[in-house]
Amino acid sequence: MRILITGASSLPGYRAALEALRRGYEVVGLYYAHPIPVEDEKLRKVFIDVSQLDDLRRL
């Protein structure tokens, strides 16, 4: 299963991403201000400004 987490570098998003990875999910983690401090083959990190519709369309 795959899960999308916005704000994956913030504390709640980061913890949600870690838990999803622990449970075996593939995670697409969106971040803007700070990089996501995790390396995992099931984690796809996406630098994006979610307030920009064109950026979201490229996901």
Image (tube, rainbow, N blue to C red):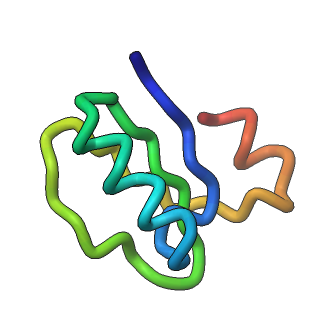
**Residue 2 shown left or right of residue 25 in the figure:** right
Please state, as top left, top right, bottom left or bottom right, where the N terminus lies in the image.
top left
Give the residue at the far top of this rendering.
Answer: 1
**Residue 4 shown left or right of residue 54 in the figure:** left
Q: Is residue 47 above or below residue 28?
A: below
Give the residue at the far bottom of this rendering.
Answer: 33
**Residue found 47% across the figure and 55% down from its top:** 16
Relative to the observer, which residue lies in front, 34 or 10?
A: 10
**Residue 34 shown left or right of residue 35 in the figure:** right
Q: Is residue 55 above or below residue 57?
A: below
The image quarter in which residue 30 lies: bottom right
Residue 37, given in percent of the width and then of the height, sits at 27, 75
Residue 41, given in percent of the width and then of the height, sits at 13, 40
Residue 43, given in percent of the width and then of the height, sits at 28, 44
Relative to the observer, which residue lies in front, 43 or 53?
A: 43
Q: Is residue 29 above or below residue 26?
A: below
Q: Is residue 39 above or below residue 41?
A: below
**Residue found 32% across the figure and 56% down from its top:** 18
The image quarter in which residue 24 lies: top left
**Residue found 54% across the figure and 63% down from its top:** 13
**Residue found 55% across the figure and 38% down from its top:** 4
**Residue 43 shown left or right of residue 1 in the figure:** left
Please state, as top left, top right, bottom left or bottom right, where the C terminus lies in the image.
top right
